Amino acid sequence: MYFSHTSTLIRSPIRSRSAPAKAADSRHALAARVRKYKAGMFAEFRHESKAFRRLIRLAVNEAEGLACATPYAHLLLPALVEERIQSVQRWASHQHRVSPGLHPSPLAADSGK
């Protein structure tokens, strides 16, 4: 049995995806990897105080913004995140040493999670 649409299907050239479509796919894949990476980073600090987790979130978002401004975001993001988190940890420790009553220890668990 012969169906008229079969010949059209068979004779239709196989079109490769355009460069913009491939670029969009790679951007989506990169965005998915970045989201997964950030979720893992935030999970590492889930036992910290709420205020400290907020600082970590801000630091990670800042690092993501800086990394995404380059064509090598996937390579720079881990290093930038590490640098920003260390900076937050140093700042929080300094604030706790200077005024412990106003700034709780960055590693103290928050009772109001």
Image: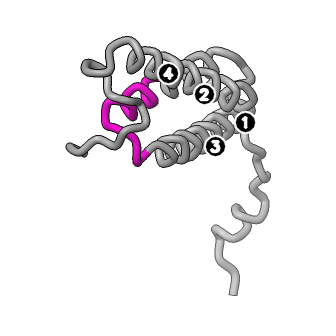
User: What residue is disc 3 on?
Assistant: 29
Q: CA distance from mark 2 to mark 4?
A: 10 Å
In terms of sequence position, does the residue under pointer 3 or pointer 4 come before the other?
3
Q: Residue at x 79, y 52 (%)?
A: 13
User: What residue is disc 2 on?
Assistant: 81
Magenta stretch bounds: 46-59
Q: Is residue 22 above or below residue 61?
A: below
The reply to whether discs 3 and 1 touch (Cβ–Cβ < 8 Å) is: no
Foreground mark, 1 or 2, reads 2
Q: CA distance from mark 4 to mark 1?
A: 43 Å
User: What residue is disc 1 on?
Assistant: 18
Q: At which x and y percent is residue 78?
A: 67, 32
Classify 10 Å Cα crowding around label 3: few (below 14), some (14-19), many (20 and above).
few
Foreground mark, 3 or 4, reads 4
- Identity of the amino acid at label 3? Ala
Q: Quadrant of the N terminus?
A: bottom right
